[in-house]
C-alpha cells in the first residue's frame, strides 16, 4: 500500500522527514516576490493556480528585465483565453520566453548550458501530477519494499489521468 | 602537524572498492597497509545536496566536482577537457578521483560472469580466454558477495557453490508488469543481483526506494567503495588522501622500490613498501604506469611489450523509449531491478555480441517533462499529460560485450598536463561491426518488446553510450607479449607489483563488472598474504 504523506511522516518520524526537507532548501531568496503580471503569466503557462510567489520571484529575478515582454506575452495569452494549450500557438517571437518560464516552473531549472541555474527541487511542478505514486528522487516514501505492493492512486489524481 | 606516512608493508595506490577490500583483508591478517588516494574525502550529505542543486541531474559526474590537484572528467555543462578524446568514437568515461572511488555513483548491480564469458576464444573463436577459469573465481565471488551483502535470484546462469548470502529485492510493480508482459515473447526477465540491502545489514539500512541509486544513494543502502574504505580503516589500514601518485620507481632488480606522490601544494613525497598494488582506476592506472619511465623501462613500468592501456573495453549500449498501452508506473523503488537474462550466451557469439537488456525503473518525470515541453505542451494539458505519459513511460537499454582490441587504448597526453604538471589521459576508441551487428539485433528486440507491451511513440537511440565499466587496459594473460599481468595479477615485469582493477579483465561479458573486480581483489588479497608470510 502507498502511504499518504501524513502516514509517511508517522512512519519515518516527523523529525527525520523535516530534517530531509530542511537540508534541501535553497538559501533564503534575495529576490522580491514576483510581480502580479509574472504570476498571472506563470499560472496560465503551467496550468496551476497555486504557484508560490517567492519561487516566482526567484525565477523572475533570473530572467529579469523583460517587463515589456512579460506584458506582451500576457496580452497574447489573454486573447487565447481557455483555448491555450500549446507554446506553438504563440507568436514565434514570444515562444522562447514562454518556454523559459514554463521550463523553470516545470523542471526547476532556468536557462541552459553554462547559464543553467536551479531554482527549486521539491517545489518543482513536474513531481506534482504523480506525487501519490512516485517519490521525489533522494526522498523516501515509506517502508522498504513498498514498491512491490499494488498501487492505489489517489482519487483526486486518478481524475487527472 | 603530523608527518604523512612514508612506508608500509603493502602500499596501495587508490582507495576505491578494490583497494579498500584488499586493505581490509590484509589488515585483518596482520599486514599493515597504506592507501594513497589522489582525491579528497567527500561526504554523502554534501553529494546529495549537490545533486539536488545541480541543473544537470542526468549526468552522474555532476554532483562530484573535480578537485584541482586530482581532476576527473566532467561533461556538464561542457567537457572540462581532462579526458582527451581521439575518437573515432567517443569514450565518455565517468569515473571519480575521490576517497572511495567511482562506486559512489554505481547502481550496485553485483553480477558474476558466465563461465563461457571467460573462454570466448576457445568456444566461439572471438576475443580472448582468461588465464583463470570461473571455478578459480567462484569461491572469491562468494566471499565478495558476503562482504557486500549481495542478494539475487537462483537463475542467473552463473553456477554457485552456496546460495546468495542475502535475499533478493522484490520487484517493483513496474518490473513485475514488464516481466509478465514480455514473457510470451520468450524473454526471460530476472531480478538483478545487487549489493543493495534487502534487509538491514552491516550497520547500513535496508533500501527504502529513494529512487536515486545513481548518482548517489542518500542512505548508503548500497555497498560502495566508501563502505569498503570505512571498514578498511576500522581494521587499521591507513589512508593518505590528496596524494597524487605520479611516478613508480624500480630498483636494479626491477622490483618496485617506491612510489612518489604530490600533495595539493605540489610538494613531493616518496613512499616505500615491500609489495605494491595499483588500484587507481582502469584509466588512471595505465596512465600512471606509462608516465613512470626510466632508462630500463622507456615505455613505462610494466610495459615492456607495450600492452599497458591497450584492449580498452566498456559495455557500449543503446536504448529505446516508448509508451506502453496500459499504465505500468515506473519509478517506484530502486532505479534498476530486473533485466532480460536469456540473450547473454549462445553460438551467435561467434558472429555478434551477446547482450543484457536492462529494464529501467527510473523516475520518468524529468524525461517526460522535457519531452512534453519539446512538443510545446503547456497550460492545463501539461499536468494531465505528465501523469499519463509518466504512467506508461518505458525505457530499456543494453550492455554489449565488446571484444578486446589493442588499438582501443588509453594513452598519456604528453602535450596536455593538469594543474600538477601530470599528463592528462587520452583515449582512442572504435566500435567494431561485432557490436554494430548486435546493435541491429537489439533494435529488433526493442521493437518486439514494445509490441508485446502495446507500445506507441517508439523512439530508438542507436547511438552508443558508455556505461562506465572500464575494462581491458591492464589485461591479464599467460603470455607477457600480449598481456600486462599474469593469472595472479602480478606484473610480468616486476615481481612485487600487482594490479587490482577492472582493467585486468580479459573479456567484458554482458554484466556490470564490479563484483568480478571485487572477487579478483579478494583472490589477490590471498596471494598478497601468502607473499608476505613467505617473504
Image (tube, rainbow, N blue to C red):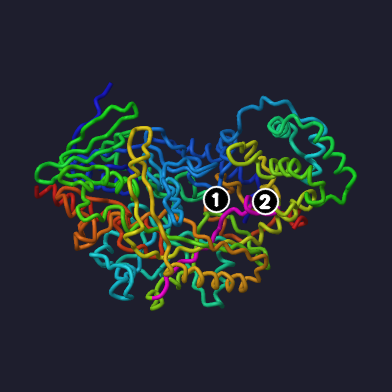
Q: Position of residue B339 (x, y in %)?
A: 49, 65
Q: Position of residue B211 (x, y in %)?
A: 55, 50
Q: Residue at x 61, y 32 (%)?
A: A26
Disc ID at residue B369: 2
Dot 1: within a 10 Å radius of its alpha carbon, few (fewer than 14), some, or many (20 or more) residues?
many
Report the quarter where the N terminus of chain A lies.
bottom right
Q: Residue at x 20, y 58 (%)?
A: B486
Image vertical order of residue B6 relative to residue B228, above or below? above
Q: Within the magenta stretch, is there residue B368? A: yes
Please give the residue where the numbered disc 1 appears in the rendered image. Answer: B211
Dot 2: within a 10 Å radius of its alpha carbon, few (fewer than 14), some, or many (20 or more) residues?
many
Q: Residue at x 67, y 40 (%)?
A: A123
Secondary element at tag 2: helix
Question: Taking B31 as reference, is B92 left or right?
Answer: right
Question: Taking B493 as reference, is B367 left or right?
Answer: right
Q: Within the magenta stretch, is there residue B489? A: no
Tell which of A80 and A159 is nearer to you.
A80
The residue mark sitting in front, 2 or 1, is 2
Tell which of A141 and B157 is nearer to you.
B157
Residue range highlighted in magenta: B351-372
Secondary element at tag 1: loop
Circles 2 and 1, Cβ within 8 Å, touching? The answer is no
Q: Is residue B40 visible?
A: no
Q: Is residue B400 visible?
A: yes
Question: Taking A126 as reference, is B299 left or right?
Answer: left
Q: Position of residue B443 (x, y in %)?
A: 54, 69
Disc ID at residue A48: none
Q: Residue furthest top?
A: B1
Of label 2 and label 1, which has the lower sequence position? Answer: 1
Image vertical order of residue B177 relative to residue B22, above or below? below
Q: Chain of mark 2?
A: B
Amino acid at each position: 500500500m502507498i502511504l499518504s504523506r501524513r502516514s509517511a511522516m508517522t512512519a519515518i518520524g516527523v523529525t527525520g522527514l523535516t530534517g530531509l526537507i530542511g537540508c534541501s532548501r535553497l538559501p533564503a531568496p534575495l529576490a522580491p516576490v514576483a510581480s502580479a503580471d509574472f504570476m498571472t503569466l506563470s499560472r496560465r503557462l503551467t496550468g496551476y493556480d497555486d504557484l508560490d510567489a517567492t519561487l516566482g520571484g526567484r525565477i523572475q529575478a533570473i530572467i529579469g528585465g523583460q517587463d515589456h515582454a512579460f506584458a506582451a506575452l500576457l496580452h497574447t495569452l489573454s486573447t487565447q483565453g481557455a483555448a491555450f494549450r500549446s507554446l506553438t500557438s504563440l507568436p514565434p517571437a514570444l515562444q522562447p520566453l514562454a518556454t523559459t518560464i514554463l521550463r523553470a516552473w516545470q523542471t526547476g531549472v532556468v536557462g541552459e548550458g553554462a547559464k543553467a541555474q536551479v531554482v527549486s527541487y521539491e517545489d518543482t511542478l513536474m513531481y506534482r501530477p504523480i506525487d501519490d505514486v512516485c517519490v521525489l528522487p533522494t526522498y523516501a516514501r515509506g517502508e522498504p519494499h513498498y514498491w512491490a505492493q499494488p498501487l492505489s492512486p489517489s482519487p483526486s489524481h486518478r481524475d487527472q489521468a | 602537524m603530523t608527518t604523512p606516512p612514508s612506508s608500509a608493508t603493502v602500499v596501495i595506490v587508490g582507495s576505491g572498492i578494490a583497494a579498500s577490500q584488499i586493505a581490509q583483508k590484509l589488515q585483518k591478517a596482520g599486514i599493515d597497509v597504506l592507501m594513497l588516494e589522489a582525491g579528497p574525502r567527500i561526504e554523502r550529505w554534501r553529494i546529495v545536496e549537490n545533486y539536488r542543486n545541480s541543473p544537470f541531474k542526468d549526468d552522474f559526474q555532476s554532483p562530484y566536482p573535480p578537485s584541482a590537484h586530482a581532476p576527473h572528467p566532467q561533461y556538464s555543462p561542457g567537457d572540462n577537457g581532462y579526458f582527451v578524446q581521439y575518437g573515432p568514437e567517443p569514450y565518455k568515461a565517468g569515473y571519480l578521483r575521490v576517497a572511495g572511488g567511482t562506486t559512489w555513483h554505481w547502481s550496485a548491480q553485483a553480477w558474476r560472469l558466465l563461465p563461457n564469458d571467460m573462454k570466448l576464444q576457445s568456444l566461439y573463436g572471438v576475443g580472448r580466454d582468461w588465464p583463470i577459469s570461473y571455478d578459480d573465481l567462484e569461491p572469491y565471488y562468494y566471499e565478495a558477495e558476503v562482504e557486500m551483502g549481495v542478494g539475487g535470484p537462483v537463475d542467473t546462469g552463473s553456477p554457485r557453490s552456496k546460495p546468495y548470502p542475502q535475499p533478493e529485492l522484490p520487484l517493483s510493480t513496474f518490473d513485475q508488469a514488464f516481466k509478465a508482459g514480455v514473457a510470451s515473447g520468450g524473454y526471460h526477465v530476472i531480478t538483478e543481483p545487487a549489493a543493495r540491502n534487502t534487509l538491514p545489514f552491516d550497520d547500513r539500512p535496508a533500501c527504502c526506494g529513494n529512487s536515486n541509486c545513481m548518482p548517489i544513494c542518500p542512505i548508503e543502502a548500497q555497498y560502495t567503495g566508501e563502505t569498503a574504505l570505512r571498514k578498511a580503516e576500522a581494521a587499521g589500514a591507513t589512508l593518505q588522501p590528496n596524494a597524487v601518485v605520479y611516478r613508480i620507481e624500480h630498483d636494479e632488480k626491477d622490483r618496485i622500490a617506491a612510489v612518489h606522490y604530490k600533495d595539493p601544494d605540489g610538494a613531493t613525497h616518496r613512499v616505500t613498501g615491500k609489495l605494491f598494488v595499483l588500484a587507481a582506476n582502469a584509466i588512471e592506472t595505465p596512465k600512471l604506469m606509462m608516465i613512470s619511465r626510466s632508462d630500463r623501462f622507456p615505455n613505462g613500468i610494466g610495459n615492456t611489450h607495450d600492452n599497458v592501456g591497450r584492449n580498452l573495453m566498456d559495455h557500449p549500449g543503446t536504448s529505446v523509449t516508448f509508451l506502453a498501452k496500459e499504465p505500468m508506473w515506473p519509478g517506484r523503488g530502486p532505479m534498476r531491478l530486473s533485466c532480460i537474462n536469456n540473450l547473454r550466451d549462445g553460438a551467435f557469439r561467434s558472429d555478434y555480441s551477446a547482450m543484457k537488456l536492462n529494464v529501467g525503473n527510473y523516475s520518468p518525470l524529468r524525461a517526460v517533462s522535457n519531452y512534453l515541453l519539446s512538443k510545446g505542451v503547456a497550460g492545463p494539458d501539461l499536468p494531465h499529460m505528465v501523469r499519463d505519459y509518466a504512467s506508461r513511460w518505458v525505457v530499456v537499454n543494453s550492455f554489449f560485450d565488446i571484444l578486446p582490441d589493442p588499438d582501443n587504448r588509453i594513452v598519456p597526453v604528453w602535450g596536455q598536463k593538469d594543474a600538477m604538471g601530470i599528463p592528462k589521459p587520452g583515449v582512442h576508441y572504435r566500435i567494431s561491426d561485432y557490436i554494430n551487428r548486435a546493435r541491429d539485433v537489439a533494435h529488433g528486440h526493442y521493437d518486439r518488446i514494445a509490441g508485446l507491451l502495446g507500445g506507441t511513440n517508439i523512439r530508438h537511440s542507436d547511438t552508443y553510450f558508455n556505461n562506465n565499466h572500464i575494462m581491458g587496459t591492464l589485461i591479464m594473460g599467460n603470455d607477457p607479449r600480449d598481456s600486462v599481468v599474469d593469472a595472479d595479477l602480478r606484473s610480468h615485469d616486476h615481481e612485487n607489483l600487482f594490479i587490482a582493477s577492472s582493467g585486468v579483465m580479459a573479456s567484458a561479458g554482458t554484466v556490470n563488472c564490479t563484483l568480478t573486480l571485487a572477487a579478483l581483489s579478494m583472490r589477490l588479497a590471498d596471494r598478497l598474504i601468502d607473499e608476505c608470510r613467505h617473504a
